[in-house]
Image: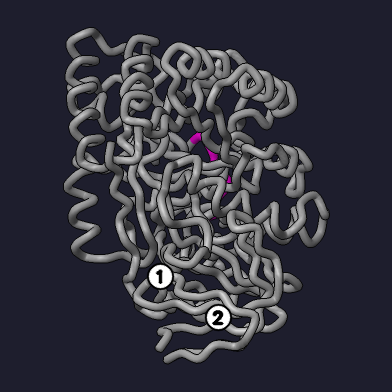
Amino acid sequence: MLDIALNNGRLIDPAAGIDKTASIGFQNGRVKIISDLPLNGRQVFDVRGRIVCPGFIDVHGHIDGHRYGGQLDLLQGITTTIGGNCGFSPSHVDQFLEQQNQNGFVINQAELVGESATLREAVGIIDPYVPADDRSIELMSTIAREKLEKGAAGVSLGLDYAPGSCQKELLAMARLCAEYHRLLAVHTRMTTCFDLNSLYELLNLAQETGTRLLISHYVYQYHAGGVRPGLEIIRKAREAGLDVYLDSGMYVSWTTGVHTATYDERNLHDNEMRFEDMVVATGEYTGCRMTREIYEKIRASREESSVIYLEGAENDPQVWECLMPAYAMPSTDSMEYRPGEGHPQIAGSFPRYLRQMVREQGLLDWPEAIRKATILPAQTARIRERGSLQPGWKADAVVFDPQSIKDNARYPHLGRPDAVPGGIDCVFVNGRLAADHGQCTGETAGEVVFYTK
């Protein structure tokens, strides 16, 4: 008998070319059957009036095994996350993966090796403005190779956070990713927020090494005037044969750690960033507008505070424009926060994407929007047997109401950043019911995605 039967829903699986009323059955963690007739199982769900689709895959997160962050991902329909982004990853990625595999987790996880922070610190480069020398590059390459051999998904760069990073160290990482056919995910270097030279820097890496390149949270990087010209640069690069993709969020106001180079005095000055446009997202000042006094206090403390920079309109059309190219996919930039803290992206990104881009704006139809959130990230990150509900594939699935799916999360000075979205009935991870109408069931069926050469 089937473990799970989902009957009479609108099954949308872009990878398989399916968009029809059908029933689907799960057994032993995998899709067993798709039928035009209702199915029997140990658990039977009548999902008429709902869309049933593969679980969403978030190519840019910072969950890294943090339980509450994983739960918030799950409740917005994410069944697989790729962590270790922006140059930050667990110090020992291979050990982290083994531990997660043994303990289980609420969703599936793949992990990148972070270069710009984690590897640089591992070889003794503490100052983010200092370039790596030849010896350091050799050591970082050795460590990264070891982690790739043991199953890491690729390498991430956070060039905003290590402004001193030199071309030689970036080329070394790009060559490794090309050799192992893994992903090079990059938070671009922004000398100023009006700079497009950062794109040419990355495209040069792709051209010289043949690596597959993912440009991270594109709207956050290029919102201040670079969205359209940047997309044109990327379009031409792809036409020239470069293997380039991008992910982008559903907000223009972004967040990062107050102790990073992004919030250094020099960078604030160069980018004309004002304290009154900042909101503290964590700690005792959560929800407070930044002042000089608060800035100096939290910068002087050891607490890793997160600060949101507010810019642009709430429904800026550039957000949608970033996600229109066929090679663009939604992402969260999620990370671990305590309840009531953080940025609304941690709970609202994917429901907001579907609400705005399909139901309200009509910019994408349901199959295309789902393709960008499922099989496209799976193919980009080379994740096998996920992103589709074909028989034999892993049974990761979302059931949602297309008429009511919505985000409820708000910025911390306006509401709760971690408010649970509406309109998502069920989320299944490896064939087990992991979320039921906005509540986690307690299942830890998530698996680790190990990569082989």
Instruction: Classify the position of the N terminus by image quarter.
Output: bottom left
- Amino acid carrying mark 1 in the image: Arg
Q: Position of residue 229 (x, y in %)?
A: 72, 21
- Between 429 and 417, the one lying in front of the other is 429
Task: Between residue 450 and residue 314, name the one nearer to us.
Answer: 450
The answer to whether residue 66 is seen in the rendering is yes
Q: Which residue is mark 1?
A: 30
Q: Secondary structure at mark 2?
A: loop
In the rendering, at what x and y percent does residue 143 appear? 19, 28
Residue 340 x/y as whole percent: 48, 64
| Three-letter residue code for mark 2 | His
Q: Residue at x 65, y 41 (%)?
A: 252
Q: Earlier in the sequence, mark 1 or mark 2?
A: 1
Residue 71 position, x and y percent, is 42, 66
Q: Quadrant of residue 422?
A: bottom right
Q: Would residue 428 be found to the left or right of residue 375 on screen?
A: left
Give the CA distance from mark 1 to mark 2. 22 Å
Of tags 1 and 2, the one toward the viewer is 1
The residue to which callout 2 is attached is 437
Magenta residue span? 287-292
Q: Is residue 107 magenta?
A: no
**Quick check: 5 left or right of 284?**
right
Looking at the image, which is closer to me, 292 or 218? 218
Foreground residue among 27 and 79: 27
